[in-house]
Image (spheres, helix red, strand yellow):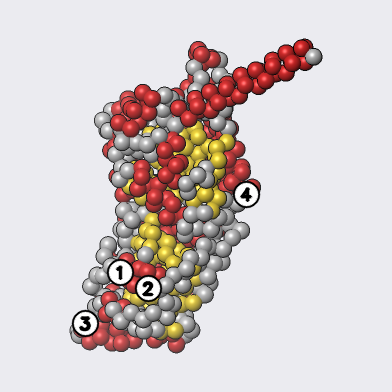
Amino acid sequence: GKLGLRGYATASTKAAEVKSRIEAKRQAAVAGGGEKRIAVQHGKGKLTARERIELLVDPNTFREYDAFVEHQCTDFGMSEQKITGDGVVTGVGKINGRTTFVFSQDFTAFGGSLSRTFAQKVCKIMDRAMQAGAPVIGLNDSGGARIQEGVDSLAGYAEIFKRNVLASGVVPQVSLIMGPCAGGAVYSPALTDFTFMVRNTSYLFVTGPDVVKAVTNESVTQEELGGAGPHTKKSGVAHDAFDNDVVALARTRELLSYLPQSNREPAALRYTADPVDRADAALDTLVPTDSHQAYDIKDVVARIVDDGRFFEIMPEFARNIFIGFARMGGQSVGVVGNQPLVSSGVLDIDASVKAARFVRFCDAFNIPLVTFVDVPGFLPGTQQEHNGIIREGAKLLYAYAEATVPKIAVTTRKAYGGAQCVMSSKQLRGDVNFAWPTAELAVMGAKGAVEILWRKDLSDRAKAEEEYNRLFANPLPAAQRGYLDDIIQP
């Protein structure tokens, strides 16, 4: 009997010991790189990986995966350096009550550098997200590849890239750049649907300032090379930038409210007190009858969509076209509109690429498209021609023609030339095409047209322009030919 009791005591002691070891490891995982490194992170105005997740997901909904994972590398004394969790926090939670998978890179642990086990953790939740049909959000804050692991680290990146590609158009993917993201690591955010940055603390570049200096002898700061400014205004790599981590996470929650969980679901519906049949007299005078006078397309959009609210995508890049999400009758819609305030709303390379990618995203995720057309044509000039306006403009045409989601287009004013065809025209399988009385659908504007039509006798230019405008500078010719479904009062 005594032996039995002793065996029981030994077993319970052993169980208690294992339990305490497990608890110690769990505490180590929560501690990340330790208090000193966390203080440094806070000193830079950045939150820790876990703090970010807490703000991103609904309270008490996060379920962590692989908290006990540690790297298996033995080279360069790495067997003596282990941090539980290995530099990334992964798991599943709820955002606005809907399942979302998250990985958050921990800069306090090995500088958030990617190891083989780190990559395995990220790949696991990406696989789960595709199985479950739920979005993936990646919070990036990493020094790049873990050099001590060599090709294992590179293989890890490639495994993540492959999953970004496989998940594309299947589940929404959002990347937040909340610290450095350099080298090969940049290609994962580039493959996702939306990339957001945090001003002054996040950087995206393939090669850093030191390499640029060594190769090209060009001196440049991290901010100038790959900060939020260059990527939201010049390169178009980032879809928006926010002042700090808290705002970035809150805006990401807002974006997800417009999106479906996967390509197998319809776009999200939300109750609205804004009546569908609401009239707005201001719309009748918002668009000037003089086609040379500018107006803000955002004012038009705000007066038409539910509660005047929309989520603009890429507000700083290619500002001559507006894209974003809104709701109409509680239904999530993608809105595209030429912006007359910037370059008269002309289509150029950047605008075409920006809108084409957005249209294809909406098509992949069952989000209806509403297009506001006021376009004078494609931007002329050697720079545009030599940089491939034909190739890039064709992408927007292709995107609209390919899209099978419901497509409504409203021509508010100018719709000239090839650009009129591209902007969700009836011929590109537009479902419903409306025009306002201010619309002008023609091959070109009156000024250019009269020089061709009356080139032999242009003694009375004003009369010629008046005649051309009477014939073409109104929506009737297009409606008479069935290219418009109706001419409506705004």
Does residue 38 appear anywhere in the picture? Answer: yes
Q: Which one is nearer the viewer's eye here, 460 or 242?
A: 242
Q: Nearer the viewer, mark 2 or mark 4?
A: 4
User: In the rendered structure, are the residues bearing label 2 and label 3 in contact, judged by CB atoms less than 8 Å apart?
Assistant: no
Q: Check disc 2: other Cα within 10 Å, few if <14, some if 14-19, many if 20+.
A: many
User: Looking at the rendered structure, which numbered label has been put on residue 304?
Assistant: 2
Q: CA distance from mark 3 to mark 4?
A: 66 Å
Q: Quadrant of the C terminus?
A: bottom left
Say above or below: 300 vs 179: below
Q: Quadrant of residue 327?
A: bottom left
The residue carrying mark 3 is: 461
> Which type of secondary structure does the marked residue at label 2 adopt?
helix
> Which type of secondary structure does the marked residue at label 3 adopt?
helix
The tag earlier along the polypeptide, 4 or 1, is: 4
The residue carrying mark 4 is: 132
> Which type of secondary structure does the marked residue at label 4 adopt?
helix
Residue at the spot x=40%, y=70% of the render? 306
Residue at the spot x=30%, y=45% of the render? 243
The tag earlier along the polypeptide, 1 or 2, is: 1
Q: Residue furthest front?
A: 1
User: In the rendered structure, are the residues bearing label 3 and label 4 in contact, judged by CB atoms less than 8 Å apart?
Assistant: no
> The disc labelled 2 sits on which kind of residue?
Ile
Q: Which one is nearer the viewer's eye here, 304 or 216?
A: 304
The tag earlier along the polypeptide, 3 or 4, is: 4
Q: Nearer the viewer, mark 3 or mark 4?
A: 4
The x, y position of residue 425, in whole percent, is 46, 72
The residue carrying mark 1 is: 299
